[in-house]
Image (tube, rainbow, N blue to C red):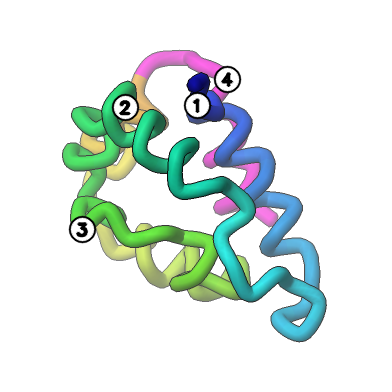
Amino acid sequence: MSAPTIEQVLLKLKTHLSLTEEEQAKECPFTADEKKVFIENHGQIVSGCPAFSNHGCPFTQIHTLKTLKEKVGHIQGLENRCPAMANSSSTHDVIAQLLKD
């Protein structure tokens, strides 16, 4: 079983947040198996994230860009503390775009 990449999850989150709450799916777009493998593969990054360290599913917890910005906006030194934003990776670009929109 393969899991989505971090980039795929973030791009899907961006699409999710571009919809109104009424248009958004009520369930996480990933299967239980995909989530399990994703956490096995990327648990260190997820647990290191100051915003999502509880492993909560952002698709069921966050419905607007405003909520996402509130959740991560208060984190001082976000660019240094967020494992997905560190370095010049494609995940950095996706998160930066999400927070900018």
Q: Determine if the magenta segment contains residue 65.
A: no
The residue where tag 2 is placed is 42
Callout 3 amino acid: Asn
Q: Residue at x 37, y 67 (%)?
A: 71
Q: Nearer the viewer, residue 60 or 53?
A: 60
The magenta segment is: 87-101
Res. 90 mark: 4
Residue positioned 54% across, 62% down in the render:
59
Mark 3 vs mark 2: which is more N-terminal? 2
Q: Where residue 54 is drawn, which disc sits there?
A: 3
Between circles 4 and 2, the one closer to the viewer is 2
> Residue 14, position in %: x, y?
68, 50
Q: Amino acid at mark 1?
A: Ala
State the separation of the CA atoms marked 1 and 2. Answer: 10 Å
Question: Closer to us: mark 3 or mark 1?
Answer: 1
Mark 1 touching mark 2, by CB under 8 A? yes
Between disc 4 and disc 1, the foreground one is: 1
Is 99 or 56 nearer to us in this picture? Answer: 56
The magenta stretch spans residue 100: yes
Q: Residues within 10 Å of mark 2 (few under 14, many from 20)?
A: some
Type of residue at label 2?
A: His
Q: Secondary structure at mark 4?
A: helix
Label 3: element kind: loop
Q: CA distance from mark 3 to mark 2?
A: 14 Å
In the figure, is residue 25 to the left or right of 10?
right
Q: CA distance from mark 4 to mark 2?
A: 16 Å
In three-dimensional space, the C-alpha distance between marks 4 and 1, rounded to whole angstroms, equals 18 Å
The residue where tag 1 is placed is: 3
Label 2, secondary structure: give it.
Answer: helix
At x 59%, y 74%, the residue is 63
Quarter of the image with the C terminus in it: bottom right
